[in-house]
Image (spheres, coloured by chain):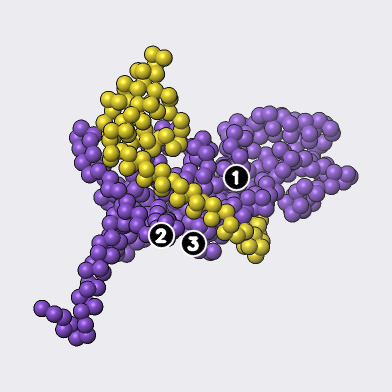
Amino acid sequence: MISFFRDVLRVLRLPCREQTHLLSRQLDAPLSRGEACGSRIHVLYCRSCRTFRKQIRLLRDLAGSAGRELQSAGELPEDVRRRIVKGIQANRGRDTTQES
Amino acid sequence: MELCSRVSSLCFGRSSSLGGARVVALAVARRAAVRRTDVQVDPPHDALFGMRSRRLATGRGTIAHVECVSSVPVTDADDQADSLQQSPRSAPSSAPRSTAVSAGDLTIVAAAERWVREHGDVLWRFAMARARSKEIAEEIIQETIVAAMLAFDRFSAASSEQTWLLGIASHKIADHFRQLQRTARRGESSTHDGAGIDASDMQDRFDKRGKWANPPQKWDMRGDGAAENAEMSAALRTCVDALPPSLAETVWLRDIVGMPAEDVCKALDLTATNLWTRMHRARSALRACIERTIGMRHEEVSKLKAAQPARSVGPGGQGSP
C-alpha cells in the first residue's frame, strides 16, 4: 500500500516529457498499479498528454491492422523457394570448397 | 565439449580399434560458414579429441554432422560426405562401412531447408511488406537463412525459431535501408518533398522543464471514418519507412507484426528499457510526422476550397466586382 502511494506521488511529480514515456511504455509493458494510477490522474488534467495518448493508441491500432493485412499477403512463391534452397546448397558447397 | 565427447563415443566407442579411420565432420563455425574437416585418425585418438575439444571450447564451431567411415580411402570419404550433404537425413544407417550421426537430429543444411519450408511464408510476407520488391525480398530471405546458419550455435530455445529468424530478417532489412539511405544522401542532398519523417519530427517537443513546448494538435478526423483510416494508414506507412532503420525495425516487429515485447527484445537483442526507449522515440516521431502530413493535407484542402469560389464565378474570370 505504501509503495502504491509512493508510486502515485512519484508519477504525479513527473513533467509531461516523462509522462509521455510512461504512456508509451504502457503499450509495451504493464505499469505498476501506482504508476498506472498516477499516469491516469495526470492525463485527466493534462489535455496535451491526453491527446498524445489517444494518438499513439490510434497509431498502434493502425499498425496492427496493417499487420493483419500482411497475413493475407500471400505465400512464398514456389520458384523463389526453390532458388533459396538452391542458394543455401550452393553457399554451403562454396564454403566447404574454400575450407578444404 | 559435451558434443565432442558424444562424437568421440559414437565414432570410436563402437569400434575402438579404428586404425586409420577417417572422420568426416561438417562443422559450422560462427564466422566461416559450413566447414568440412577431414581428419586422419591414427592412434592415439586423444590427439584428435584434443584438437576438436579446443575448437569447440573456443565457441567457434559446432559439429553438425559426423560420419565415421572405417578404413576408406580419402576419395570415398569425400563422396560419403557429399552424399551426406545431399540427403543428410537419409544416410544409410545399415551401410556396412558408414554410420551417419546427426547432432541435434538435424544438420544445419537440413535445418535451413526446414526453415524455408516452415517459416518461408512468414519471412516472405515480412520482407515483401518492407522491401516491396520481389527481388529484394528474395535476397533478404537468402541472407537471413545464411546468417541463421552461421549463428545456429547461438540460437537459444528461449525464443521460437520464427522469432529468431524474423529478428535476423529485420536486421538484414535495416541494413538494406541503411544502404539505400547512404546512396540517397550521396546522390541528392535536398529533395525532401515533405512526406516521411522530417528532422523536426525527431526533435524533442518539450521545454527545459519538460513541459510541452509544442503540444500535439488534435487530428481533425473529418468525413468518412474508413477513408480517413485508409489515408492515415498510408501516411503511417510512409512515415514508418522514413524512420531511422533501427527504430523502423522495432516498430515493425512490435506494432505491425504484433510480436510480444519480450520476443522483440530477444529478436533484436535489446533490454526491455532499450525497447521502451526506442518505441517511445519511434511513436513520438510517427505521431509528429502524421500530424504534419495531416496538417499539410488540410492546408491543401483549404487552398482548394478558397480557389473554388473564384473558379465558379464564371468563364473568363468575369466575376461580379
Amino acid carrying mark 3 in the image: Arg
- The chain letter for the residue carrying disc 3 is B
Residue behind mark 1:
B162
The picture places residue A20, in percent across and down from the top left corner, at: 33, 36
The picture places residue B192, in percent across and down from the top left corner, at: 28, 62
Is B304 situated above or below B242?
A: below
Q: Are marks 3 and 2 on the same chain?
A: yes
Q: Mark yes or no: residue A98 visible.
A: no
Q: Earlier in the sequence, mark 1 or mark 2?
A: 1
Image quarter where the N terminus of chain B lies is: top right
Give left or right: position of B219 versus B245: left
Q: Colour of chain B?
A: purple
> How many C-alpha atoms fall within 10 Å of the one at disc 2: few (<14), some, or many (≥20)?
few
Amino acid carrying mark 1 in the image: Gln
Separation of disc 3 and disc 1 at Cα?
21 Å
Instruction: Report the mark closest to the observer, 1 or 2.
Output: 2
Residue behind mark 2:
B224
Q: Colour of chain A?
A: yellow
Residue positioned 44% across, 58% down in the render:
B226
Q: SS for tag 3?
A: loop
Q: Mark yes or no: residue B222 visible.
A: yes
